[in-house]
Amino acid sequence: MLYPEHVIEEIREQSDIISIISEYTALNKKGSSYVGLCPFHNEKTPSFSVSEDKQLYYCFGCGAGGNVITFLMQKENMTFIEAIKYLAERENIKLDETYLSNEEVENNKKRGLLLEILTESARYFHYSLRAPENEEALHYLTSRGLTMETIKHFGLGYATHQFNDLYEYLKQKGYSDQLLLESGLFLQSKQNQNRLYDRFAGRVIYPIFDLSKKVIAFGGRVLDGSMPKYLNSPENILFNKSRNLYGMHLAKNSGASYFILVEGYMDVIAMHQAGFTQTVASLGTAFTPGHAKLLKRHAKEVVILYDSDGAGQKAALRAIPILRSEGLKVKVLLLQEGKDPDEYLKTHGYESMKNLLEGAPSDLWFQIRTIEKKYDLKIPEEKVKFLQEIAGLLADTSSSIEQAIYLKEISKTYEIDEEAFKAEMNRYYQQGKRKVAMKVEAVSPHQKKQVFNNEVIFLANLYHYPNLARHVQSYLKPEFFEQGLLYDLAKAILESLRTGEEIDMTYFTTHYPEVNEQNIISHVLIHKDQRYEDIALLQKMMTENVKRLNKIYIERRLKETTDISEVQNLLFQKKELDRLNIDYING
C-alpha cells in the first residue's frame, strides 16, 4: 500500500460516490439507496444500486460492484493509485509524496518535467507566431477569420522551418535529450542517433490541453501543401488520443445543454469564436468509447457536426452507436453545399448555425435517410428491402418509447401498415436476442457476471438477515472461511452481530483495493438474495451451511492436528453435527 489507511479513507469519505457515478448514469433515490441503469452493461430496466451510507455500488444484473475508487478503476481503466490521485485532486486533498515508492516519485518527477517542457514549448511557439519574420503563419490564421483574441485564447503558435530551433531553446534550459525525446516534440536522426530535430518544423501549432488546462500535446498543420497535412504528438504518459478531446478544457465550462462534435482543430476554434463554446473534436483518430465517456461527464446530448462528404457520413455512422452505448442522446447535422462548419459560419453566421443545430434530426432519422439512399423506393422489391433494413435498425434501439414513436413516424412517412412494420421489427428483435445469447463469450470481462461461491452467498445472507443469523452465530467461527478477504468479512459480520455496531468500511477499502475483491465486498454488503425471501427456505439454507462449514473445518483439523485430546473433541463434534437442530424461534 503506497498511501496510509487514513489518507485513503479521507479521500474515500470526502468523495461523493453519488455525484461521481451520476456523471455516468442517472440515479434516482429509492428508499435508502439510489438506483439507475448500469453503466457497465446495456439494460432497459434499472438493476444498478448505490448505497450512500456504505459508499458502495452493486449491479444485480452483471454483478459489477465496489466503492468509489474501484468504480473509477472499472469505468476509466485507472489503477488504484491513479484513482486515488484523481479523487484527491477532485477534492483538493494534498497527497504527501513521502508515501510513494521511489518508482512513483520518479514517475511523478518525470511527468512534472514533461509538463514543464510542453508549457515552455507552447510559449515559444506562440511567441514565434507573433514574430515579424513569421507573418506568413499569422496571415494563414487571420485569413481564416480568426481574431488575435481567439489566437491567444487557444494558444496557437508556429514552429519555424529551422529543424532545431526549439531543440536549442530547450537545451539551454537544461533538459536532457532523453526527456526531450519522450516529450514527443522531437525525432531522432536515422543517420546520427545522438541528434534530435524538431518534429513540427514549418507548421502552425495547436496546443492540446487536458481538463485542468495543462498542455499535454500538440497538433501541427503545414502551410506549403506537403504531407501529412496534419501531425499530432505521439502518445506518452501525458497524452492518450482516445481519452482526450480538443477543446474540452473550454467546452466543459460552457454550461450548454448539449455538446457539438466536429472533425478538426479549425472547426472547433471557429465554432468557439462564433459563440458555440461547447464544441470539441477527436484528435487525429476515430471517435472512441473513451471520448464518449468524457462527453457523458458533462452533457446528456451530442450533436455530430461532421463534413457532409462520404467520409464525414461514415464517421458519423461509426460514432452514433458509441455515443448511444453511453446513454447519450444523439443528433446529426450535415451541412449542405459540402461546407464545413468554419466555411458555413463565414457565409451564414451564428443565428443560421444555431437554428440548424437546434433543428438537427435525430441519429435514427439520419441513419434512416442514409439507408434510403441505397434503394429506389419506387420499385416494390427495393422498398421491401429498405423497410426490412430500417426495421432491423429500430429493433436494436434500447428505448421502447423511442421504438413506439418511430414506428408511427416511419409507417406514416413510408406508407406502410403500422402492424406489419411492427411485426417485422419484432422479428428482428427476436433474432437479435438469439444472437446475443450465442455470443456470451464475446462479452467484455467487466460485463461477465462474477460467479460467487457458497461462502460468499452465505456471508451475504448472514449480513442481510441478522435476526436469523443471531441464531447460528454461536456455531460459526471466522476460521471456517478462507484466509484473507472471506475470513475478514466473516469476522466483521460475526462481530457486528455480537455488538450491533456497523462494519468498519475503512479496513476493507484499504486492505482489499482490487476490483474483484471490492466486487465480493459489495455483493456481501449490498446484494440481498431474493431467493430466500421465503423464511423456511432461508432457515434451511442457514442450517445446511452451518453444518457444511463445520464439517469441512472438522475434517481439515483432523488432518492437521497431532493433539490426541483435540482429535477426540473433533470426532465428538462431528458426531453431534449430524444431530444438530437449530431452533430459530427460541434461539
Image (tube, helix red, strand yellow):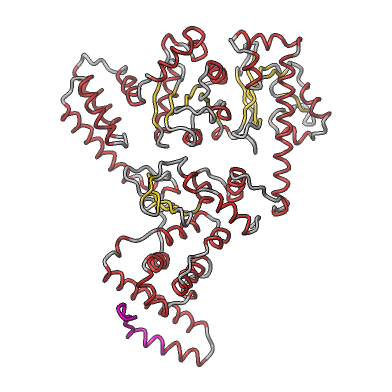
Provide residue 126's location: percent of width, then percent of height: 71, 20
**Residue 243 included in the magenta stretch of the image:** no
Horizontal arrangement in the rendering, residue 505 relative to residue 320 (left or right): right
**Residue 575 included in the magenta stretch of the image:** yes
Residue at x 36%, y 25% (from the top left corner)? 363
Horizontal arrangement in the rendering, residue 453 relative to residue 6 (left or right): left
Q: Quadrant of residue 42?
A: top left
Above-or-below relation of 211 to 316: below
Main structural element of the magenta stretch: helix, strand or loop?
Answer: loop
Horizontal arrangement in the rendering, residue 378 relative to residue 348 (left or right): left
Provide residue 487's location: percent of width, then percent of height: 50, 70
- Count of labels shown? 0
- Which residues, given as a range, are shown in magenta? 572-587
Q: Nearer the viewer, residue 366 or 52?
A: 52
The quadrant of the rendering that contains the C terminus is bottom left
Q: Nearer the viewer, residue 261 or 558?
A: 261
Provide residue 353's location: percent of width, then percent of height: 45, 14
Residue at x 28%, y 64% (from the top left corner)? 533
The quadrant of the rendering that contains the N terminus is bottom right
Above-or-below relation of 218 to 564: above
Residue at x 44%, y 11% (from the top left corner)? 338
Horizontal arrangement in the rendering, residue 579 relative to residue 23 (left or right): left
Provide residue 6's location: percent of width, then percent of height: 62, 58
Q: Quadrant of residue 571?
A: bottom left
Above-or-below relation of 257 to 505: above
Q: Quadrant of residue 185?
A: top right
Residue at x 26%, y 32% (from the top left corner)? 403
